[in-house]
Image (cartoon, helix red, strand yellow):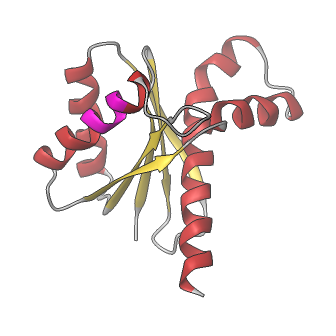
Amino acid sequence: MKIMAVDLGDARTGLAVCDKLEILASPLCVIKETDFNLIIKKISNEIINNKIEEVVIGYPKNMNGSIGERAKKSELLADELKKIVPEVSIKLWDERNTTRSATIFLNQTNTRGAKRKKIIDSVAATIILESYINFKKQNLK
């Protein structure tokens, strides 16, 4: 199944996709947009253009598990995407610490400066997607 992950941000939103066999997750793009309605439109276009069957939206719960403003924005994104692409499964996925993991990865690969800023959101989306794929594999056993 072709799955897309979304790391929703205020200025940049990272997208990642996996292959149909759910083996390899890769960065797709970064949407540089602050207008929430345009973000929804651009994400839905990517879903349609890439023939995505399932979308996993990063759900940034607070460290104590409570739901803050960022998580509520992810819930709203999920609700809006369900209206636009009702045939696609839309899920929220706990993404605590994915940006930190992306930062560690980019440090290890010595990715700095403008290049780092350009890709960190899509790397975070890739980490979200890898986490989700691994969870699915573990629960199919």
Is 74 or 42 nearer to us in this picture? 74
Q: Quadrant of residue 80?
A: top left
Query: Which of 68 and 17 lies nearest the eye of the viewer?
Result: 68
Classify residue 40 as left or right of residue 119.
left
Q: Quadrant of the C terminus?
A: bottom right
**Residue drawn at x 29%, y 48% as measured from the top left:** 47
Q: Is residue 112 left or right of residue 134?
A: right
Residue 60: horizontal and vertical position, in percent?
A: 50, 35
Q: Give the position of the N terminus as an image quadrant.
A: bottom left
Seen as rendered, the residue at the extreme bottom is 141
Residue 10 is inside the magenta segment: no
Above-or-below relation of 54 to 21: above
Relative image position of residue 7 (x, y in whole percent):
48, 35
Query: 133 or 141: nearer the eye?
Result: 141
The magenta region covers 72-76
Query: In this picture, is 97 found above or below 134?
Result: above
Which quadrant of the figure has residue 114? top right
Residue at 74% across / 11% down in the picture? Answer: 113
Does residue 21 show up?
yes
Give the residue displayed 56% in from the left and 29% down from the top. Answer: 121
Counting from the top left corner in percent of width and height, residue 63 is at 62, 34
Q: Camera-side residue: 84 or 110?
A: 84
Relative to residue 6, is residue 79 drawn left or right? left
Q: At 20% from the left edge and 42% from the top edge, which residue is drawn?
A: 79
Q: Main secondary structure of the magenta part?
A: helix
